[in-house]
Image (cartoon, rainbow, N blue to C red):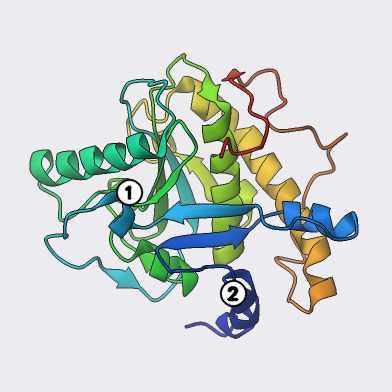
Amino acid sequence: MTACSQGWISRRTFLSSAAGTGLIMAFPLVDQAEAAERGGGDTRRLLRVHAREQWDARPPRQRAQILNRPPNRIVIHHTATANTKDYSLEHAYRLSRLLQRFHMERNGWDDIGEQLTISRGGHVMEGRNHTLAAIKSGRHVVGAQVRGHNHHTIGIESEGTYSNAPIPAPLWYSLVDTCVWLCHAYDLNPFLAIRGHRDFNATECPGDVLYAALPYLRKEVARRLRRLNKWLPAHGTRPIRPNIKVPAFPKPPPPPKPPKIPIVGRTKNRTGR
Ligand SMILES: [Zn+2]
């Protein structure tokens, strides 16, 4: 590990303290900061990442390659599957099984290609084997999601086809949460790190609509990291990227506010869970 990993231990220990059974990875998000600013209260909103055991993944043909360094890019994809209205967890599990079967049987890969999958209902799933363990330790599991760039990129598959369809709110919020988590875990600058699949390969992925939303995703993730930063030092934890240059935003909008992102189905809580 690099020298900077020393500093990660304390914050990672802190941040994974609510991990529970280990089957669900939990990560406290900026709501904790907001709750703290209000003088306490509910700090339990967590990003839940459902591990492979939960969606009943089949064993990989071989163990994933794990690199002893973080990735430097987060690649956003769409699955190019139907824009279902089934937002249930059961559906999300089925989706991951379907993708894994397709990638292994049709593409002949060792396992599901991407490291993380987010359903239209906003459920976040572990993809390639050992992904959660690798992220927790600041390392990189090599996936199969961006030809020629798998050794330095971590991929998020967003369920649906976003050539012209709007992005469902639960998916959008979980995408923001997941990118906050990854930027934090890997110490990445969202303005540099978050990219679309088409930035690397000749592909329509992640669709014109989702691709056009990426600048808003970067800004929102940066805003959230900045808020998280304010809160962490007060709790004895090293700040995240203290020198990150985050442009000032006129007003922190309730995401996804920008009118150019066609989002449908706003939910009461931010993840729809
Ligand atoms: Zn893609």
What residue would you read off at disc 2? 12
The residue where tag 1 is placed is 114
Name the residue rendered at 71%, 65% in the picture: 241
Please tell me which residue is depicted at 80% across the width and 44% down the height of the picture: 247
Up/down of 167 relative to 219, above or below: above
Q: Nearer the viewer, mark 1 or mark 2?
A: 2
Q: Is 212 in front, or is 37? A: 37
> Residue 100: image x %, image y %?
21, 45
Left or right, residue 252 beside residue 93: right
Q: Element type at marker 2?
A: helix
Query: Do tag 1 and tag 2 residues touch (Cβ < 8 Å)?
Result: no
Residue 23 in picture, x, y percent from top left: 40, 63
Instruction: Tell me if mark 1 has few (under 14), some (14-19) or many (20+) residues whose alpha carbon lies within 10 angstroms of its own.
Output: many
Local secondary structure at mark 1: loop
Q: Is residue 104 above or below residue 88?
A: below
Q: Nearer the viewer, residue 231 or 271?
A: 271
Give the residue drawn at x 56%, y 81%.
Answer: 5
Considering only order in the chain, which callout, 2 or 1, is on the residue closer to the N terminus? 2
Percent x, y of residue 190: 62, 50
The structure residue drawn at horizontal position 16% and vertical position 38%, both measured from the top left corner, is 102
Does residue 231 appear in this view?
Answer: yes
The amino acid at mark 2 is Arg
Q: Amino acid at mark 1?
A: Glu
Give the side of residue 240 with respect to residue 129, left or right.
Answer: right
Above or below — where is 53 with respect to 120?
below
Q: CA distance from mark 1 to mark 2?
A: 23 Å
Could you tell whether 78 is left or right of 266 in the image? left
